Image (cartoon, rainbow, N blue to C red):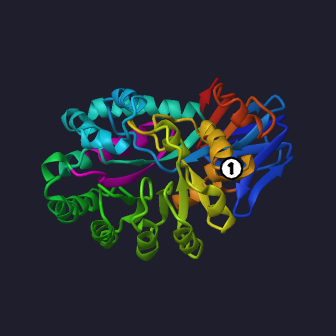
Amino acid sequence: MMSSNSILLKNFNTIISANEKGLIKDNKSYLYLEDEIIKSYDYRPSQIEIDCKGKMITPGFVDPHTHPVFLNTRHDEFLMRLKGMSYEQIAINGGGIVSTIDSVNKSSEKKIIDNLMLKMDEFIRFGTTTIEAKSGYGLSVDSELKSLSCLESVNKDHAIDIIPTFMGAHAFPKKYQDNPNKYVDIICNEMIPKVADQGIAIFNDVFCEKGYFDIDQTRKIIECGKNFGLKPRLHVDEFEDIGGIELAIETGAVSVDHLMASNSRSIDLLSKSNVIATLLPGTSFFLNLDDYAPAREIIDKGVSVALATDYNPGSSHMKNMSFIILLSTMKLKMSIEEAFVACTYNAAKSLQLEDSIGSISIGKKADLIIWDIETLEEIPYYFMDAPIQKVIKNGKIAFEA
């Protein structure tokens, strides 16, 4: 009997996927999807048959580090950087993260949700079927809860899957910049308990960096979050190495993100842990920095590497994972195969979702890209064109060119 929710993919030249061991190429003839799941490689009668026109099929991209809950852009900061100001100088002069807060605090949930829905349309168009999304542009109890509530609403109504992260420890609000420990107490005593009661956030992230949250403050926030069931992730070594990798290992973080300033000793320690390194080359590119994460050393020492866009209004205003693959090959010295695995299977692993997404295998979610190209090498080459025929999310067509 034909399922009322089934799709048969046929006439593709190859399936390219990934697993713990790396890249997988498969020359199956059919791919049958039913009820949101990859069911079979055999021909079966289906509600919809898609002719893939001899092109390539891959898993949908997984973007494990984004900051999409904002309204105002920060294009003025782009001009400041062109005139020679650094990210840190802009922040000291009132720009950066805190400049985004007012618009989020003052906006209705409907306005934020409408804005997020449009952004998610663009992520899907570029082939991303799952994103991790952080709060962190509210920095007050009510606004952080509002941000997470908006993410939950969009997750329910949009095709894309959103994995929510609480990030009240993104920066210090202006009124606490002279008394940062007071704000840390608010995060631990007020925000985290209410975030846990709300029941939306899965992860708890902290910007552990000079000028932001120091090691002791970060440890306190992470341990508090763990007590309330929030899994730790950390921004570390974006500008300076202050011991963030060591703290991530100590506290059992799932992922450490950025790592542009990481040193060999920290990478050695990372290689002996289960912590995943999530690298964000778009940030270095957008900030016009010379420093990129030492991906080659990280990979060669056996650390699992994921890649992400770091989509945000100030330091990485991009949603295109194909461009991240290009940057990774050019600036991080990764192979195309390594970059692809880092955008799919390893990215899913950094969200602890590798058993359901990030690769193509029987029983996993039917999150797929049907490309208009035939080889993996063409993804970075045609990054501007987004040569995608269709994006399938949970077994349904979510985008069609």
User: Which amino acid is tagged 1?
Assistant: Lys
* Label 1 residue SS: loop
Q: Quadrant of the N terminus?
A: top right
Residue 239 spot, x, y in % from top left: 42, 53
> With respect to residue 217, does 85 lie above or below?
above
Q: Nearer the viewer, residue 146 or 377?
A: 377
| Residue at 78% from the left image edge and 54% from the top image edge | 24
| Residue at 80% from the left image edge and 49% from the top image edge | 41
Q: Nearer the viewer, residue 276 or 189?
A: 276
Residue 5 seen in the figure = no
> Which residue is identified by label 1?
333
Range of residues picked out in magenta: 146-172
Q: Inspect the magenta stretch and tell me whether residue 162 lies in it.
A: yes
Residue 293 spot, x, y in % from top left: 55, 54
Q: Nearer the viewer, residue 150 or 79?
A: 79
> With respect to residue 349, does 130 lie above or below?
above
Quarter of the view holding residue 281: top right
Q: Is residue 340 left or right of residue 83?
A: right
Residue 299 spot, x, y in % from top left: 66, 62
Q: Quadrant of the C terminus?
A: top right
Residue 201 spot, x, y in % from top left: 36, 56
Q: Residue furthest front?
A: 84
